[in-house]
Amino acid sequence: MTTTESGQIVTTRRQRWHIGDVTITKFVDCVEAHDLSHIFIGATTEKIMAIPWLRPHFITTEGLGLLSFHALVVDTPDKRIIVDTCWGDNKDRGPWDVRSNLQTTFLENLEGAGFSRESFDIVLCTHLHADHVGWNTMLVEDKWMPTFPNARYLLDKTEFDFWMNPYDVATGGGFDKVQELCVLDSVKPVYDAGQIDLVDGAHQVCDEVQLVPTRGHSKGHVSVRISSRGEEAIITGDMTHHPSQLVHPEWGLKEDYDFDEARRTRERLYADVSDKPVLLIGTHWAGVTAGYIRRENGAYRLEYKE
């Protein structure tokens, strides 16, 4: 694990989980340390430090929150799927200059592990924010082309329509401009190539994989439910960003499309899976990344799954 000049913590550690006949493999783009009081409305460092089980995987000794940016490859008996595609290389992210024109080894890491771009059948995007769609496309002779040439890209229709048309968000911090840029270089080229399939809410992707609506963070946000041989997992997307929200589900982001709905979605899903054998795999959870939700002292905690 190393730290770059931009403050990113780069890790090559690969994790893998088995859910019945399904294998889920994590590919990390980067891990970053952030002051969560600047990210979550209502959070404080004191409240973060008061959650002892967050260490060492999810916060630093100083109380900074660790956020991971990774993709998850889901291999079923019949389909190879990639869920969310991180930041992508060579992309102008305008006011977020630290995100612009990245040069990473993401594709090389996939290829080196035996996952060629051509081998993927499906790309799933939990939503269309810039850090979840970047590798949807790659630059080929100055033109954005679908990175996964043989895949169908499954997107929620509500989410797609919202970002492809004028939208009513103004969160500040350059978020609006970044989203405009990412739609142009990471979504529209796939649509123009005819590789996008739009689906409505809950959608059965294949026998083992289903999209489930988890609205709030974005208008058409979905999570990914995986079921096989009596075992179950849920890939969260940005339904939840950090395990501290298990204790404080009221903490949300100013970038949330509907702050209150995002809170209700967290509360509902946490309650639905708590004390059950449902593995929760956090799309931004660093370290162990996955675990089971347990009730404890009137709140929730995460029981790690290495």
Image (cartoon, rainbow, N blue to C red):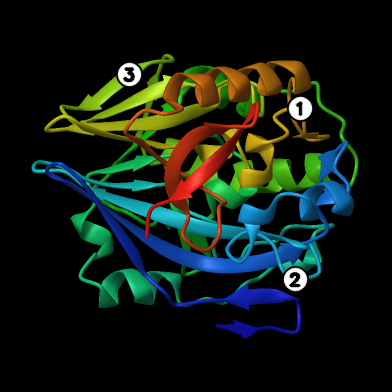
Relative vertical location of residue 210 with respect to residue 8 in this rendering, above or below: above
For marks 1 and 2, the one nearer the N-term is 2
Residue type at mark 1: give it. Glu
For marks 3 and 1, the one nearer the N-term is 3
The part of the image, by quadrant, that contains residue 93 is: bottom right
Please indicate whether residue 177 sits to the left or right of residue 200 in the image.
Answer: right
Tell me the distance, in whole angstroms, between the alpha carbons under discs 2 and 3: 41 Å
Give residue 250's mark: 1
Residue 235 at least partly seen: yes
- Residues at circles 3 and 1 in contact by the CB criterion of under 8 Å: no
Q: Residues within 10 Å of mark 1 (few under 14, many from 20)?
A: some
Q: Residues within 10 Å of mark 3 (few under 14, many from 20)?
A: some
Relative vertical location of residue 15 with respect to residue 247 in this rendering, above or below: below
For marks 2 and 3, the one nearer the N-term is 2
- Residues at circles 2 and 3 in contact by the CB criterion of under 8 Å: no
**Of helix, strand and loop, which one carries label 3?**
strand
The residue beneath circle 2 is 61
Residue at x 71%, y 49% (from the top left corner): 51
The part of the image, by quadrant, that contains residue 55 is: bottom right
Residue type at mark 2: give it. Thr
